[in-house]
Image: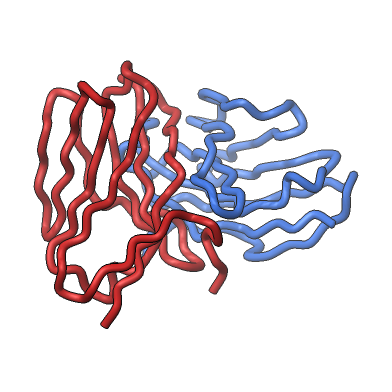
Amino acid sequence: GESVGLHLPTLSVQEGDNSIINCAYSNSASDYFIWYKQESGKGPQFIIDIRSNMDKRQGQRVTVLLNKTVKHLSLQIAATQPGDSAVYFCAELKAAGNKLTFGGGTRVLVKP
Amino acid sequence: ETGVTQSPTHLIKTRGQQVTLRCSSQSGHNTVSWYQQALGQGPQFIFQYYREEENGRGNFPPRFSGLQFPNYSSELNVNALELDDSALYLCASSLAGLVETQYFGPGTRLLVL
């Protein structure tokens, strides 16, 4: 399949360990944040979202943390599996807006 | 897999040519957003179509244009292609402009020579 990105920051993690992916966002007016996973040859896939009035949200094996003070977002993946290998993007959205602004992405490589 | 399909999957054009990319939205979705993803970068919003009208546009020149049809499928047209237009073009469909719940297609890889 095609490569999503050749020069992305890369996080190498051992299978079974936890992964933490970080993202700095720019717009303090953003109301809503989403994490996407993009595998080779595919479009971005929704993982989890969080609204600006929250600081933590949990899903299945994933947790998103939001620190509005420093405009920082993180995605934690518990017990990382080989299928988690992909490029991960954060995206921000202003309230009532329709324009998602994506960050630069992080490649996660899971070592067996 | 999402129900969003795009065609063609790959395309090679030369500078100055025109290209049309197509997107079929997921059943029941009336909104289509288009994004350009250069290699190594996140997707950038081009524009959105809702009920056959443009409903927001990113920082792209007028030679990027689009259409949405009554069945909510959509086209992205790019005129006077430039080398920097080489990218993966993604469409995403959603209901009533709610990009929070949009589903992406697999993209069309465009190479401009």
Q: Position of residue B23 (x, y in %)?
A: 57, 51
Task: Identify the residue at image location x=40%, y=60%.
Answer: A10
Residue A67's place in the image compared with B27, above or below, is above
Left or right: B4 with respect to A71?
right
Residue A96 showing in the rendered view: no
| Farthest residue, direction top | A29
Quadrant location of the C terminus of chain A? Answer: bottom left
Q: Position of residue B40 (x, y in %)?
A: 55, 53
Q: Position of residue A61 (x, y in %)?
A: 12, 60
Residue A64's place in the image compared with B50, above or below, is below
Left or right: A48 with respect to B65?
left
Residue A19, image quadrant: bottom left
Along the line of sight, the residue nearer the viewer: B109 or A79: A79
Left or right: B28 with respect to A54?
right
Residue B16, image quadrant: top right
Residue A14's place in the image compared with A44, above or below, is below
Task: Identify the residue at image location x=63%, y=65%.
Answer: B9
Shown colour of chain A? red
Task: Identify the residue at image location x=49%, y=40%.
Answer: B32
Q: Position of residue A2 (x, y in %)?
A: 57, 69
Quadrant location of the N terminus of chain A? Answer: bottom right
Residue B67, image quadrant: top right
Q: What chain is the blue one?
A: B
Task: Identify the residue at image location x=57%, y=27%.
Answer: B58
